[in-house]
Image (tube, grey):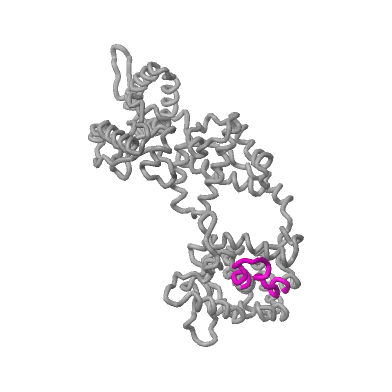
């Protein structure tokens, strides 16, 4: 029924606020966003019959309370109390989807047959007949109010019978599932995709940009979007929004994932229209993207010998200086280093001569293979020792790089650092280094040193050990399926020592 929702077995009533009064309601109700679209109130019952009995009185109580607050703030009360709440678009969609679920749950097997008239029906027929009767009454009421009652009736029924699917159904189900396993940064990128897709759908209909992008997308009907329009999304992203082929492909991938989920859950019928949509983009991105490589020895010397504090008047010098060296000697990713805490430094109480180490946990890991332990070579251990002293020993959650303040999607500590290091790199190596080397090039250099050490006789520097240390999935079946995920601290330590001794030149070691 309209205005009712069930959460965790408990019924709630929803009072929908007219759009033109969202700001007023947000003001008097103290909304953090400045607007309030609706008010949800528990009916304190788990039975549908009791919820129906309490619904109307609860709605009126909410309305009266809101009007009292509006008047107290010198604002006009809500008008049009005689307009039924089910006219609201969001409530119509909600109620139609509830009817869709109810129809899907009942049997369509004939359980009544009249021998005289030949009439027959099923439980499903009776539910639909009851819905038709309700919709006829509502259509008549809308016609009397000067609105298009037939349009409301047809749209409601098409959604309820599964002939039309509003995006709200996809979004609610998919995002709830997505939040159970995806990181906050991935979900943020999903939202960027949905915002772009909403703009595109409005553009394809000759409309301006919606005030509420997600709200507009929720009301769109999946089946009403032509496949030709879907096929033009990538061109629009590149031609109108000036996105690169790689970024356009990244914007399309979440839509493919959402459609796959909807098909799997029988919300939509296949095939998935986004299958193959990024193939051409990957080819274009491959042609557009220059080869990003490791640093040369000359570049490493310039970066390590430069003083980042002199690049600009900023507070990023110590972080850049320390993280360059740690990345070069551990192969760790930018955010894995920026998020280091006191508790993630290993083996400080080990035997004399044992290497310290750092730990990458599930929270910072890019993939499941990225969860790992990495020994620290004695040349870079003093950096960690200094940062431990500054952080203090009492709190294991204390960050070693507090200068890397969180920001961006997912509030990552590496977010602002990723914007500052390119300034330093260009200051040292010039703008010609753009798109050729980046901070990840320290990781590429680490792998290069590892391979050079192996060729020079460092027996511990094997391909499998390298993959474990950098957090990559092993390419061999034995390494990926049968070998232990952790090959042991002693082997890892010998590999790091061997890499530095036989893979890194004395000149670069001296610059550390």
Q: Relative to the observer, which residue lies in front, 298 or 290?
A: 298
436 relative position to 349: left or right:
right
Q: Is 300 in front, or is 353?
A: 300
Residue 64 among those drawn in magenta: no
Percent from the top left, x then y, of residue 310? 67, 70
Left or right position of 330 against 342? right
Is residue 261 visible to us here?
yes
Q: Nearer the viewer, residue 297 or 34?
A: 34
Is 288 placed above or below 71 here?
below
User: Which residue is situated farthest in the top direction here?
Assistant: 116
Q: Which residues are magenta?
A: 301-321
- Residue 305 lies within the magenta run: yes
Residue 184 higher or lower than 498, as above or below: above
Q: Pinpoint residue 120: horizontal percent, then vertical percent.
A: 32, 19
State which quarter of the image contains the C terminus: bottom right
- The secondary structure that dominates the magenta segment is helix
Residue 477 appears in the figure: no
The answer to which image quadrant residue 6 occupies is top left
**Above-or-below relation of 292 to 196:** below
Name the residue: 47% across, 83% down: 349
Q: Residue furthest bottom?
A: 352
Q: Can you say which quadrant of the picture contains the N terminus?
A: top left
């Amino acid at each position: 029924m309209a205005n009712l929702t069930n959460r965790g077995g408990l019924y709630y009533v929803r009072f929908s606020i007219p759009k033109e009064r969202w700001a007023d309601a947000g003001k008097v109700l103290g909304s953090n966003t400045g607007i309030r679209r609706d008010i949800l109130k528990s009916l304190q019952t788990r039975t549908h019959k009791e919820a129906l009995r309490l619904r109307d009185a609860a709605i009126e109580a909410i309305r009266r309370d809101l009007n009292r607050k509006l008047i107290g703030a010198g604002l006009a009360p809500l008008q049009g109390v005689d307009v039924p709440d089910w006219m609201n678009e969001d409530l119509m969609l909600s109620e139609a989807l509830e009817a869709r679920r109810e129809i899907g749950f009942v049997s369509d097997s004939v359980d009544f047959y009249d021998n005289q008239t030949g009439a027959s029906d099923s439980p499903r027929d009776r539910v639909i007949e009851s819905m038709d009767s309700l919709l006829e009454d509502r259509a008549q009421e809308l016609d009397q109010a000067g609105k298009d009652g037939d349009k409301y009736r047809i749209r409601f029924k098409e959604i309820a019978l599964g002939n039309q699917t509003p995006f709200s159904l996809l979004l609610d189900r998919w995002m709830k599932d997505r939040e159970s396993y995806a990181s906050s940064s991935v979900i943020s990128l999903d939202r960027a995709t949905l915002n772009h897709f909403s703009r595109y759908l409005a553009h394809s209909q000759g409309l301006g940009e919606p005030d509420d992008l997600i709200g507009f997308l929720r009301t769109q009907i999946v089946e009403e979007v032509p496949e030709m329009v879907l096929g033009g999304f990538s061109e629009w992203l590149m031609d109108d929004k000036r996105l690169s082929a790689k970024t356009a492909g990244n914007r399309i991938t979440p839509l493919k994932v959402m459609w796959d989920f909807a098909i799997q859950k029988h919300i939509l019928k296949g095939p998935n229209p986004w299958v193959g949509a990024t193939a051409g983009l990957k080819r274009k991105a491959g042609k557009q993207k220059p080869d990003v490589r490791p640093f040369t020895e000359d570049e490493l010397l310039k970066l390590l010998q430069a003083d980042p504090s002199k690049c600009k008047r900023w507070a990023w010098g110590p972080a850049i200086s320390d993280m360059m060296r740690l990345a070069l000697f551990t192969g760790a990713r930018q955010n894995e280093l920026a998020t280091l805490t006191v508790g993630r430094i290993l083996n400080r109480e080990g035997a004399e001569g044992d290497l310290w180490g750092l730990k990458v946990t599930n929270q910072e890991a890019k993939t499941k293979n990225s969860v790992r332990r990495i020994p620290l070579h004695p040349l870079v251990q003093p950096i960690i020792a200094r940062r431990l002293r500054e952080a203090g020993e009492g709190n294991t959650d204390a960050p070693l790089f507090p200068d890397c303040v969180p920001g961006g999607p997912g509030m990552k500590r590496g977010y602002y650092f990723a914007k500052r290091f390119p300034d330093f790199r260009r200051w040292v190596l010039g703008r010609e280094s753009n798109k050729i080397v980046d901070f990840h090039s320290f990781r590429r250099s680490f792998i290069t040193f590892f391979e050079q050490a192996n060729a020079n006789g460092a027996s511990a520097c094997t391909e499998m050990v390298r993959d474990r240390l950098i957090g990559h999935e092993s390419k061999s079946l034995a390494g990926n399926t049968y070998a232990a995920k952790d090959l042991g601290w002693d082997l890892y330590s010998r590999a790091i020592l061997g890499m530095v001794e036989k893979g890194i030149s004395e000149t670069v070691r001296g610059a550390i």
